[in-house]
């Protein structure tokens, strides 16, 4: 009972339903990525790859695009999900034939507002990160019918592609701050999603999400495999 007193009381949240995305690189090569909710027992391999890919820099000056702080925060968020210390988190993974291709996560502040945390691609060049960002927005607006999606950006690439690239408005700072370091809050509303963002992501990145997922595709991606294993 004492342990439970440390856990935030959960909301009644509609679970994330699997879907598939046809990924394509600039050479025209394609592959199908299954996107599904991560299982709690998959936290350990996720922590392993975050540590290996993002927390192994010898010098702070050698870190590209703030990968070290992004990795440290994602590591803590996965632990928070695993230890039941985050309020209504969602952890979503993208798999191609079982291999981890992409990751995204966030949490629900309340019934109206979705807090975006991080999005990562482990197989670069296939726009897997763009697909995961799109699906995270889709989950917020189309599945949960929430009013707003809040984000902030810890890397130049993220801000360039999503904050600036999608012309996301921001709330007055410092009056309103994102929980990731008190940074500026960029947001998407349900109206802006329907009128612009949903089409923007599809048109710019040729993202096609299919909610009809075969049993064969689910079976191929039942077990998570880290890249290189």
Image (cartoon, rainbow, N blue to C red):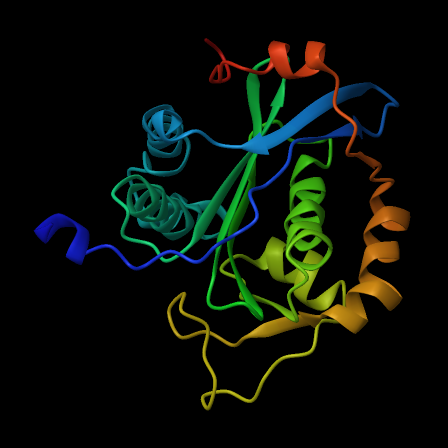
Q: Is residue 148 above or below residue 42?
A: below
Q: Nearer the viewer, residue 157 or 9?
A: 9
Q: Is residue 99 above or below residue 50?
A: above
Locate residue 187, reporting x and y percent: 64, 72
Give residue 62's quadrant in the image. Answer: top left
Q: Identify the residue shown where x is 83% and y is 43%.
A: 205
Q: Which residue lies furthest to the left in this view?
A: 2
Question: For this view, does 44 lie left or right of residue 175?
Answer: left
Locate residue 110, reporting x and y percent: 48, 68
- Number of dots carrying numbers: 0
Locate residue 96, reporting x and y percent: 65, 18
Question: For this view, does 182 lie left or right of residue 93?
Answer: left
Q: Identify the residue shown where x is 63% and y is 80%.
A: 170
Give residue 71's quadrant in the image. Answer: top left
Figure quadrant of the C terminus: top left
Give residue 112's quadrant in the image. Answer: bottom right
Locate residue 47, reporting x and y percent: 34, 32
Q: Nearer the viewer, residue 43 or 59?
A: 43
Q: Identify the residue shown where x is 39% and y is 34%.
A: 50
Question: For this view, does 72 lie left or right of residue 118?
Answer: left
Q: Identify the residue shown where x is 75% and y is 17%.
A: 214
Q: Which of 3 and 131 is in front in this view?
A: 3
């Amino acid at each position: 009972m004492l342990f439970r007193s440390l856990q935030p009381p959960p909301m009644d949240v509609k679970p994330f339903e699997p879907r598939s995305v046809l990924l394509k690189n600039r050479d025209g090569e394609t592959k199908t990525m299954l996107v599904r909710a991560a299982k709690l027992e998959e936290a350990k391999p996720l922590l392993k790859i975050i540590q290996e890919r993002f927390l192994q820099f010898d010098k702070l000056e050698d870190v590209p695009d703030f990968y070290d702080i992004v990795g440290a925060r994602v590591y803590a968020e996965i632990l928070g999900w695993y230890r039941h210390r985050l309020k209504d988190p969602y952890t979503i993974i993208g798999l191609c034939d079982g291999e981890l291709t992409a990751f995204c996560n966030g949490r629900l502040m309340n019934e109206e507002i979705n807090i975006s945390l991080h999005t990562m691609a482990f197989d670069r060049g296939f726009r897997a990160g763009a697909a995961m960002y799109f699906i995270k927005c889709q989950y917020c607006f189309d599945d949960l019918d929430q009013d707003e999606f809040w984000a902030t950006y810890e890397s130049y690439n993220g801000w360039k592609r999503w904050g600036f690239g999608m012309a996301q408005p921001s709330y007055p700072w410092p009056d309103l701050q994102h929980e990731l370091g008190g940074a500026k809050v960029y947001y998407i509303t349900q109206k802006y999603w329907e009128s612009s963002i949903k089409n923007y992501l599809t048109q710019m990145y040729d993202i096609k999400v299919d909610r009809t997922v075969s049993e064969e595709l689910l079976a191929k991606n039942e077990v998570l495999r880290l890249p290189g294993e």
